[in-house]
Amino acid sequence: MDDKVYIIVPSYNEGAVLAETVRALLPLRHEVVVVDDGSREDPGELLAGLPVHLLRHAINLGQGAALQTGMDYAKRCGAAAVVHFDADGQHDPADIAKALAALANGADVVLGSRFLPGADRRRVPMTKRLLLQGARVVNGLFTGMWLSDAHNGFRALNRRALAAIELTENRMAHASEILSLIRKQRLRVREIPVNIAYSDYSRQKGQKWYNSLNIIVELIMNKLF
């Protein structure tokens, strides 16, 4: 894409892994926006000398709020597209080029999937795989969008989608809110296969099987209440 792409990296207490993730993104020559969501450590020290845009929340507001802060900043900068990219190193920078190509070919929103042909689904632990498929069904019933992967944090949005999506769910419910807004705004969506690296760190940070169960419970509670 000709205009600037902003990679939004929401971060909360990621430590040295954050700097490793940012360094892996820099060779792509896009703008990297780190949104620190009230971490205990000083992200300025962790990212010292790295050419990134650093935004900060004074207190922890949640991943949805961090993404919205990053998207608001990108809009003010005139971004042509944004990419949502996790700070814990589980996403693959090589998938960004595929997402941007899908935007260039007419998609407004590109969603990463661990379950499409081309993705190595063997990397996904079996228990998590089953729970995510349960979340996919619940999400499809509630949002009307039947996707192969219900809760993947890797996304790309073009300028039209960036203008149309305004998140009000500060925490993990933002993922379902994005899907509801895609359908409401009639945005053109495409899934692409992506590979997720489940490291020991990411599992300790929040990739345990019961977090997938929490996704299902959250989807149901948000729909009912």
Image: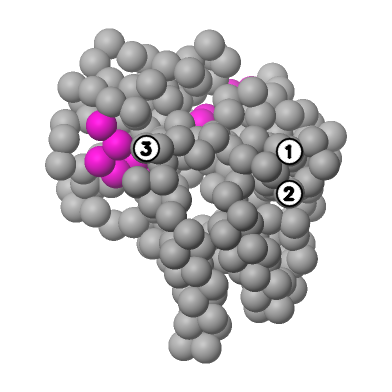
* SS label for mark 1: loop
Residue 179 visible in this rendered orientation of the protein: no
* SS label for mark 3: helix
- Residue at 64 percent across and 28 percent down: it is 96
Identify residue for label 2.
Answer: 115
Tell me whether the residue at label 1 lies in contact with that at label 2, contact meaning CB atoms closer than 8 angstroms: yes
- Residue at 51 percent across and 62 percent down: it is 212
- Residue at 39 percent across and 62 percent down: it is 171
Is 9 magenta? The answer is yes
- The spot of residue 189 in percent (x, y) is 76, 51
- The spot of residue 215 in percent (x, y) is 50, 67
* Whole-number angstrom distance, CA of label 1 to CA of label 2: 6 Å
- The spot of residue 16 in percent (x, y) is 28, 26
Identify residue for label 3.
Answer: 201
| Between discs 3 and 2, the one toward the N terminus | 2
Q: Tell me the crowding category of disc 3: few under 14, some 14 to 19, or many 20 or more residues within 10 angstroms, Cα based.
A: some
92 relative position to 110: left or right: left
- The kind of residue on which mark 1 rests is Ala
Is 74 magenta? The answer is no
- The spot of residue 28 in percent (x, y) is 57, 15
Disc ID at residue 119: 1
184 relative position to 196: left or right: right
- The kind of residue on which mark 2 rests is Phe
Tell me whether the residue at label 3 lies in contact with that at label 2, contact meaning CB atoms closer than 8 angstroms: no
Magenta-drawn segment: 3-15
